[in-house]
Amino acid sequence: MTGKNARQNAILRQVSGIGTSFGSETCYSLLPSQEVVIGRDPSCQVVLEAMSYRMVSRRHAAVRPLTSSADAQASWLICDLASANGTYLNGQRLQGCQQLMNGDSITLGHDGPEFVFEYEQNHEQATAIAPPAAIPLTPANSYPTPTSAHYRPPSKTPDALSFTQLFPIISTGKDLTRKAYLIPGVLTVIFVVLMFATVGQPQANQVIVAIYIASAAYYFIYQLCGKPKPWWVLCASALTTAVILLTPVLDLFIFVFRGLLPGSLPSEQESITLTELLVRMFFGAGLMEELLKAIPLLIAFMIAKVVPSPWRERIGITEPLDGILLGTASAVGFTLLETLGQYVPNITQSVSAQYGAGAGNLAGLQLVIPRILGSVAGHMAYSGYFGYFFGLAVLKPSKSWQILPVGYLTAAGLHALWNTTGIFNGLLLVIVGVLSYAFLMAAILKARVLSPTRSQNFATRFLGRK
């Protein structure tokens, strides 16, 4: 081989993955005239076995030659092909294409198989002083067939059929729980079966529908946040708020905000102005209920100060995303107990007295749906937005005395506007609901930007951008 030819060719050396270890690494020659696609699809040039590499997309990444003159050294680009789990170059997530340098590390997915790019001349020099079996070089015209991957020229038979194409569940079993929303599907089936099992029991039907809709609404927020949080921590936040509503703590809050402060709620016969109603709702609903729902966040906030890692990150609030997740979970507990313990029984009893038990039960079920669905633009929006400020205070502790009051007053203000406009005008209620939802979404997007674990955010990775 001439010196110029030695400089023209390069190799990809697989250094991690199924079946790779010192002495059994596999090398793939790169030619200046041929693109090499890596993935699980049989049409790729480097085909990774589907069962072993489920984190790798069917067409994950491509190594493309750059046009070069006859006397210059050939160079190559590494390009991500819109893969689900991303391509990492030297530990950094790749955006589009980037030129490869000798010794660059390429990883398919955050923890997938790793390849090293090297010029063939350098590799031959290395093998001259290393044991012959240490790094088996694959010639350009010879293709290895190890158990975990094989190299092949571009496929000219696009109708080739694989076993995993005929039985896709075999190769995607692990991904079902991570990408295909299997858990929501399973829960939906369970709730449907429970609904059938409780036909003729209206109260049970109302509870099942309420829990299902609340869970679906919260799952939507959880996916948007993109940060894993133990389910039992989130359930504990919701349960804590629900329990508080059943204790004398609620009576104390009512005494302070609706007795001592000007937050007494108007009766149906009382005639007051819009401004007076807004003031009463601000104190008697906004400030009172947002502080009550913030109790689990205060507990998590304090836990984060005394508990060491990794429990600190699991249980406590260490960033704005934690605050949003715990705040919206607390709102779920508040909404469920308020709806099922107060609003639904009241409307059921009222309608039943006039039109019979059947009409009353139907009216109760009809009330459950908008009350729980509305929590995304209602209680979950206010509490999640306030929770953002808890996490921001952790990141900027010297400014917490400014941060927390701003979040508290803003959340209470949105809450008061919702309650006030709901009485006076339906169109204004829509505007306030959209505004509240927008506040929550803006907080989530900003929290993802501020997150110390931004690179591990599954919502960011799913969307393919940071």
Image: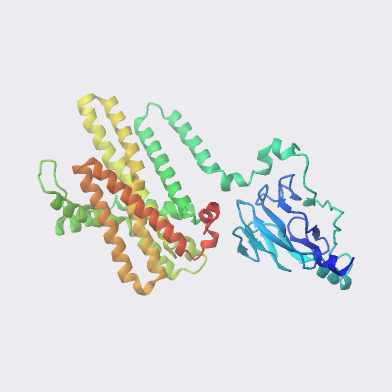
Say left or right for 40 vs 253. right
Say left or right for 7 vs 213. right
Q: Quadrant of the rendered structure where residue 130 is? A: bottom right
Residue 145 in percent (x, y) is at: 83, 51
Looking at this view, is 276 or 209 the one in front?
276
Note whether residue 234 is visible: yes
Q: How many marks?
A: 0
* Coloration mode: rainbow
What residue is rendered at 51% in x and 63% in y? 453
Looking at this view, is 303 or 278 the one in front?
278
Does 232 appear above or below 15?
above
Residue 384 in percent (x, y) is at: 37, 55
Looking at this view, is 299 or 100 the one in front?
100
Say left or right for 210 vs 289. right
Q: Quadrant of the rendered structure where residue 216 is? A: top left
Q: Quadrant of the rendered structure where residue 428 is? A: top left
What residue is rendered at 72% in x and 52% in y? 37
What residue is rendered at 33% in x and 33% in y? 365
Residue 306 in percent (x, y) is at: 43, 70
